[in-house]
Image (tube, rainbow, N blue to C red):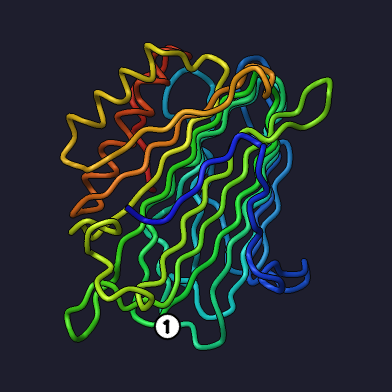
Amino acid sequence: MPTSTHDTGRHHQPECKEGTKPQPENWAGQLRLNIAQRQGTSYAASQYHEGALRILRPHYLDKSGQVNYTIINPGGAYFGADRYLLDLTIQDQASLVLTTQSATKIYKTPQGPAYQQLTAKLGEGAVLEYVPDQLILYRQGAYRQSSSIDMDPTASLALTEIITPGWAPDGSSFGYEELWMRTEVRVTGPAGPKRLAVDQLRLRPSDYTDIQGIGLMEGYSHTGQLLIADARIDQALYERIATVAEESPTRSGVSRIGGDNTYGVKALIVRSLAQSTGEIMSLQHSIIDEIRALWRGQGPLDLRKY
């Protein structure tokens, strides 16, 4: 399976290479959302967008009061050296599900990798479900992503990613140059922030004779990951999610980390290989639906992209 790492805080994990983190004035697009809660309903206390990122008007998908925002990119794709920022604050007891209008496409990037930085702060009892559509990497494209999450011990987090190889004129599936995604989750409590997890995925198809070979993509074309962090994760939930993953048409593994050294917060990371975007998306949504029902009494995630 693709290279990845999970960390409980004992070992340092490398940041993206020096120079890949952009300065604020270099953003091609930025979106800042501050989500608050009033009388059981979450809403944007403040929002700001600039450049090639926009959001659609909020939707409320059920009666829980959780707000849903959809990110759109009027340019339709990320191009070479494009740099994007998503900056989220979810205040105490607020709940946000954030998605994208369509797939994020990475085309040829001769000017350098496209880059996205996600930062999020989750307050007491806050909920963040970040469920974007798939990332499609086309021939000679390169993409790097850095996600940094700080959460209260009582907050709840779900992050998904699906990576799809784009079509190429010669029919090859892995003509892109590089994919590098790094996610770090920290829990902030009385003794300060504690690192809960680091998840890192890096793929450079040209480094391998056959990237779809044994020990790499194992004959599959698509990969995805789902990270869940919450103090309520227990053995029964782990076994249930492992069963759901095993019964899916994907080839998936489930890892769990965290515990006493992170104020009791635990994490599950589900890494998947498949032959289609839909297979991974179906698995991820099934797992998210399980925790929505178990922890908050919510119905299935039914995203509206209009």
Q: Residues within 10 Å of mark 1 (few under 14, many from 20)?
A: some
Query: At 18% from the left edge and 85% from the top edge, which residue is drawn?
Result: 170
Residue at x-position 78% and y-position 71%: 25
The answer to which of 223 and 284 lies nearer the viewer is 223
Count of marks, rendered view: 1
Q: Is residue 235 above or below residue 269?
A: above
Image spot of residue 96 (x, y percent) = 56, 33
| 269 on left or right of 302 | right
Q: Is residue 246 in view from this perspective?
A: yes
> Toward which corner of the image does residue 218 lie, by quadrant?
bottom left
Q: Quadrant of residue 77?
A: bottom left
Residue 112 image point, x, y percent? 56, 82
As shown in the figure, which amino acid type bears the numbered disc 1? Answer: Lys
Name above or below for residue 29 compared with residue 157.
below
Q: Residue at x 17, y 29 (%)?
A: 247
Q: Which residue is mark 1?
A: 108
Disc 1 secondary structure class: loop
Extreme residue in the right direction: 191
Q: Is residue 212 above or below residue 206?
A: above
Residue at the bottom extreme, as displayed: 110
Residue 108: horizontal and vertical position, in percent?
42, 83
Q: Nearer the viewer, residue 72 or 208?
A: 208
Q: Residue at x 27, y 58 (%)?
A: 217
Give the camera-side residue of 171 and 243. Answer: 243
Q: In the picture shown, does residue 300 fall above or below 167?
A: above
For residue 190, what is the image quadrant?
Answer: top right
List x then y, in percent, for residue 282: 25, 38
Q: Is residue 116 left or right of residue 179?
A: right
Left or right: 152 as drawn, with respect to 167: right
Residue 59 seen from this side: no
